[in-house]
Image (spheres, rainbow, N blue to C red):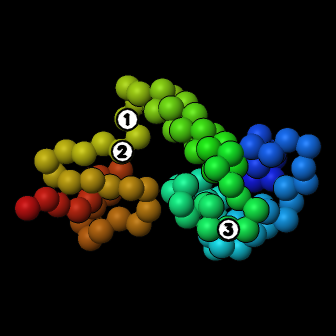
Amino acid sequence: MLELLLTMGTPRRDCKEVARELLQHFEGSLSRTLDASQVELEQVKGVGPKNAFALHFVQAAARRYLRGRLKGKHYLRLSRRGWCLPGPCHAGQKPGDFGGHFT
């Protein structure tokens, strides 16, 4: 996927090796690569300003898309009693009860 994104900034050039270098530099993480600053990206051999811009553009578009998709939806509900994620219950709680507490 990263190789395809890099071709946006470097058309008509094989970007496979640059994609490998980026993933190696950012510990195999696409999200760390996309979150990197332009300076950090350009430290990797083969990445220039156009490649860095293309990666930032894709990341910004994805964030905007997800923000729009999540707007108005609630995935984790909080109350005065606390919060609970699905999983084992604490002593005295039933499945679906809220866990944790706020001080």
Please state the total of marks drawn on the protein image. 3
The residue that disc 1 covers is 74
Residue 49 visible in the picture: yes
Instruction: Count neighbours of disc 2 (C-alpha within 10 A) and say few if under 14, some if 14 to 19, many if 20 or more.
Output: few
The residue that disc 3 covers is 44
In three-dimensional space, the C-alpha distance between marks 1 and 3, rounded to whole angstroms, equals 39 Å
Residue under the image location 90 percent in, 50 percent down: 13
Amino acid residing under circle 1: His
Q: Nearer the viewer, residue 25 or 98?
A: 25
Which residue is situated farthest in the front direction here? 49
The residue that disc 2 covers is 76
Tell me if 85 is positioned left or right of 23 in this view. left
In three-dimensional space, the C-alpha distance between marks 2 and 3, rounded to whole angstroms, equals 38 Å
Image coordinates of residue 30 in percent, x first then y, are: 65, 58
Instruction: Count neighbours of disc 1 (C-alpha within 10 A) and say few if under 14, some if 14 to 19, many if 20 or more.
Output: few
Image coordinates of residue 39 in percent, x first then y, are: 53, 60
Residue under the image location 66 percent in, 73 percent down: 25
Amino acid residing under circle 3: Val
Please tell me whether mark 3 sits on a helix, a strand or a loop: loop
Image coordinates of residue 102 in percent, x first then y, are: 13, 59
Please tell me whether mark 2 sits on a helix, a strand or a loop: loop
Q: Quadrant of residue 59?
A: top right
Please tell me whether mark 1 sits on a helix, a strand or a loop: loop
Q: Is residue 72 above or below residue 78?
A: above
Tell me if 94 is positioned left or right of 88 in this view. left
Residue under the image location 20 percent in, 54 percent down: 82
In three-dimensional space, the C-alpha distance between marks 2 and 1, rounded to whole angstroms, equals 6 Å
* Mark 2–mark 1 CB contact (< 8 Å): yes
